[in-house]
């Protein structure tokens, strides 16, 4: 099944639910444009975006909310992840079933490695030694040795694994099985499955609290987000969010959990649910754009960045004001998004062809 088909089937299965008591805040385009000047220089770093149908990656200067680089040459980039030190960017190509490692400043391709079929998400352990990808069509996760760019092992997980993240201490990888009802827990020391946790219909992505005590999962088929105690590996709560929740992310200060609600292409959702982690209730629902999909938050917890898959842009959401303060056009069908603390220092947009066709002729690795 293609990523597009998965998105449609997941959201179509969702039960239409409305978060009771949530406040919906809409920010018009003109209002957003007026607010941009007051939000430049608030955050420093680079926001990386994977444009799945555009076959490109976009780098955004977070200080200016401006595109500074567009990288082409990776077909079907569904998701990407900046390494913990910010020095590299990892991307998965659903079209070519491979993972690509890029230098985050020079944009050179460090190497590529084959994954399983239909890779969706990719993460890197806190020590930077291992990368993991979900392979939806194979029901597996691939573990990759970063130093050698070789596959270490392939791990069988649940049905159609999609999102995954590593715990803050690096001990566990939690995998959301989108065609099932569980999260698979992988022990990174042994690269072995140690548990399956029931969370609800069609979990799509997970997000850890900064202290690692809890992991949250977007439950697409129930228009909800689940809360799991990491120590006991038990479901301890569930909260209603918007229609068709996809990605989730906890602010580094631990205060908020953000859930992007995508809906379907025919009936797209347009919101992000801001969940108060103490009460585990939706504190506010903010209009961000058509098909809110990917979400990331900068290390200061001031700005969140949301890919709007049907608007072909990224919304900048100020968490202090809880409103959208900028919209940045990117490539077609922006999907995965990640934040790097490194500032590229480019004043004008740089366009780069990654030359992956030449690398494939020479072989992967």
Image: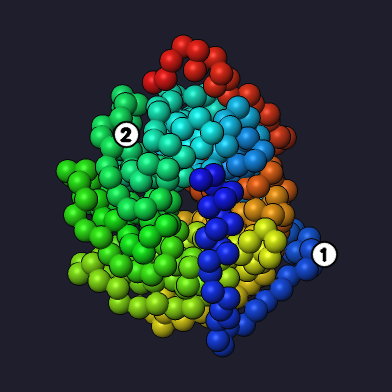
Residue 91: image x %, image y %?
Answer: 49, 37
Instruction: Using the rendered image of the protein, determine whether residue 237 is visible from the camera's viewpoint.
Output: yes
Task: Say left or right for 23 vs 266.
Answer: left
With respect to residue 67, does 296 lie above or below?
Answer: below
Name the residue that disc number 1 marks: 30
SS label for mark 1: helix
Instruction: Using the rendered image of the protein, determine whether residue 205 is visible from the camera's viewpoint.
Output: no
Residue 39: image x %, image y %?
Answer: 67, 60
Residue at x 65%, y 47% (from the top left corner): 333
Q: Residue furthest top?
A: 362
Task: Say left or right for 321 vs 172.
Answer: right
Name the residue that disc number 2 marks: 144
Residue 3: image x %, image y %?
Answer: 54, 47
SS label for mark 2: strand
Quadrant showing the C terminus: top left
Circle 2 packing at 10 Å, graded few (<14), some (14-19), many (20+), is many
Question: Considering depth in this image, is 30 or 225 the residue closer to the camera?
Answer: 225
Circle 1 packing at 10 Å, graded few (<14), some (14-19), many (20+), is few
Q: Residue furthest bottom?
A: 21
With respect to residue 312, does 236 lie above or below?
Answer: below
Mark found first going from the N terminus, 2 or 1 = 1
Residue 300: image x %, image y %?
Answer: 49, 60
With respect to residue 349, does 201 lie above or below?
Answer: below
Residue at x 30%, y 49% (from the top left corner): 157
With respect to residue 96, does 318 lie above or below?
Answer: below
Identify the colour scheme used. Answer: rainbow
Residue at x 51%, y 35% (from the top left corner): 93
Question: Considering depth in this image, is 350 or 167 the residue closer to the camera?
Answer: 167
């Amino acid at each position: 099944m293609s990523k597009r088909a998965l998105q449609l089937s997941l959201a179509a299965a969702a039960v239409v639910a409305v978060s009771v008591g949530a406040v919906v805040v809409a920010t018009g385009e003109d209002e957003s444009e007026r607010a941009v000047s007051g939000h430049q220089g608030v955050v420093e770093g680079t926001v990386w975006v994977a444009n799945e149908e555009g076959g490109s990656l976009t780098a955004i200067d977070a200080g200016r909310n401006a595109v500074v680089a567009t990288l082409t040459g990776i077909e079907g980039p569904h998701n990407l992840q900046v390494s913990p030190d910010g020095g590299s960017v990892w991307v998965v190509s659903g079209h070519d079933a491979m993972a690509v490692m890029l230098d985050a400043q020079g944009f050179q391709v460090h190497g590529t490695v084959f994954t399983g079929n239909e890779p969706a998400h990719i993460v890197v352990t806190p020590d930077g030694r291992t990368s993991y990808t979900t392979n939806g069509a194979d029901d597996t996760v691939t573990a990759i040795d970063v130093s050698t760019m070789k596959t270490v092992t392939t791990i069988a997980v649940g049905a159609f694994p999609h999102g995954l993240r590593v715990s803050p201490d690096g001990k566990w990888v939690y995998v959301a099985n989108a065609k099932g009802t569980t999260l698979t827990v992988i022990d990174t020391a042994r690269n072995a499955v140690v548990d399956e946790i029931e969370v609800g219909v069609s979990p799509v992505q997970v997000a850890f609290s900064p202290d690692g005590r809890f992991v949250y999962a977007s439950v697409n088929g129930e228009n909800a987000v689940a809360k799991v105690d990491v120590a006991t590996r038990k479901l301890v709560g569930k909260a209603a969010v918007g229609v068709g929740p996809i990605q989730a992310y906890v602010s580094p200060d631990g205060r908020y959990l953000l859930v992007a609600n995508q809906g379907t292409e025919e009936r797209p959702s347009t919101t992000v649910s801001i969940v108060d982690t103490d009460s585990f209730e939706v504190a506010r629902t903010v209009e961000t754009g058509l098909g809110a999909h990917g979400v990331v938050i900068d290390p200061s917890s001031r700005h969140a960045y949301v890919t709007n898959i049907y608007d072909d842009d990224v919304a900048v959401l100020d968490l202090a004001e809880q409103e959208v303060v900028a919209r940045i056009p990117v490539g077609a069908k922006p999907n995965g998004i990640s934040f790097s603390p490194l500032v590229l220092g480019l004043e004008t947009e740089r366009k780069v062809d990654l030359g992956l066709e030449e690398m494939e002729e020479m072989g992967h690795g």
